[in-house]
Each structure stands twice: as structure tokens, then as C-alpha cells.
Amino acid sequence: MSIGETTAEQIKIKLGCATPLMTELVMEVRGRNLGTGLPETIQITSSQIGEAMQESVEKIIDIIKQTLEKTPPELASDIMEKGIVLTGGGALIQNFDKLLSEKTQIPVYIAEGPLECVARGAGKTLEDLEKLRTVLSSSRKR
């Protein structure tokens, strides 16, 4: 079945899960049957989506762990104390925060309005372009 990006995002938000849920969730999805080319409606479950996402979730966690292993000790100490804040669409995957915390032994929090975080941060940066110029010129010197 072929679906659009918007439908895929809705599925991720409603059914996406990093670990099995206590209660199975079901969603009706409309798309185009790739065999017949005709529109079709099917029902999918959170366990199906969780299984489909499992490899990607594991890769993300592995990359986070690799990054933490390379983190300077003073920064690692701050991360251990203050935790990891998840932003973006991945933060909306059910139980991802709990699984990541379990795998890293670090507290994990979901940002308020995780989908808007990047836009808000960019907006704040643009409010003070002089600070942005300072950061950009320091990074070029390295």
C-alpha cells in the first residue's frame, strides 16, 4: 500500500512505539493498493508499526550511545546530571524516552512542543544575529 507523508506522520504519532504497548492501538489507513492501483482502506496496529520501527529505533539508540562514548567527561557529567531532552517527531514515539533512558542509564525528557523546538530555536537565534555571527566566526577559526 502506498501512503503519503502526512498519513505516515499520523501513523508514527498515533501508533509508533519503541516497546510494546499495554493496550493495542488500531488505526484505519487509506492509501493506494500497489497491486491493483486502486484506493484501499486497511487497519493497522501499534504492534505492527512498532515492529516496523524496531530497527530504526535501535539504530538511533546505538548512535546516541556512540556519541555519549565520545563526549568529553565534563559534558558527559552534565548530561548524566541533567539528562537528555528529546525534540522533533521522534520524541512522539511512545515509550522511546523510557527505552532510551533504560539503555543509557540517563534521565530522558520530552521537550514541550517537540515538533516546534527547532523553529523556536531558530527564531530565538535570529532575534540576536550578533551572537550568531560570533558563534559562526569562532567555529570557522577551528
Image: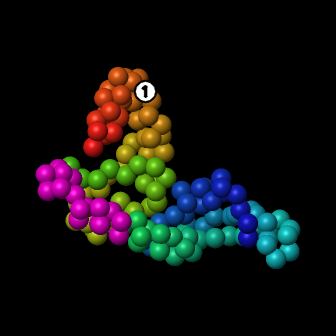
Instruction: Name the quadrant containing residue 60.
Output: bottom left
Q: How many marks?
A: 1
Task: Say whether residue 140 is left or right of residue 4.
Answer: left
Instruction: Name the quadrant containing residue 141.
Output: top left
Task: Say whether residue 36 is left or right of residue 114.
Answer: right
Q: Nearer the viewer, residue 125 or 79?
A: 125
Q: In what quadrant of the picture does the C terminus appear?
A: top left
Instruction: Name the quadrant containing residue 62.
Output: bottom left
Residue beneath disc 1: 126
- The main secondary structure of the magenta stretch is helix
At 65% from the left edge and 53% from the top edge, which residue is drawn?
6
**Residue type for callout 1:** Leu
Percent from the top left, x then y, of residue 117? 43, 40
Q: Nearer the viewer, residue 119 or 16?
A: 119
Percent from the top left, x then y, of residue 10? 60, 55
For the question of whether residue 34 can be seen, the reply is yes
- Does residue 73 belong to the magenta stretch? yes
Q: Which residues are magenta?
A: 62-80
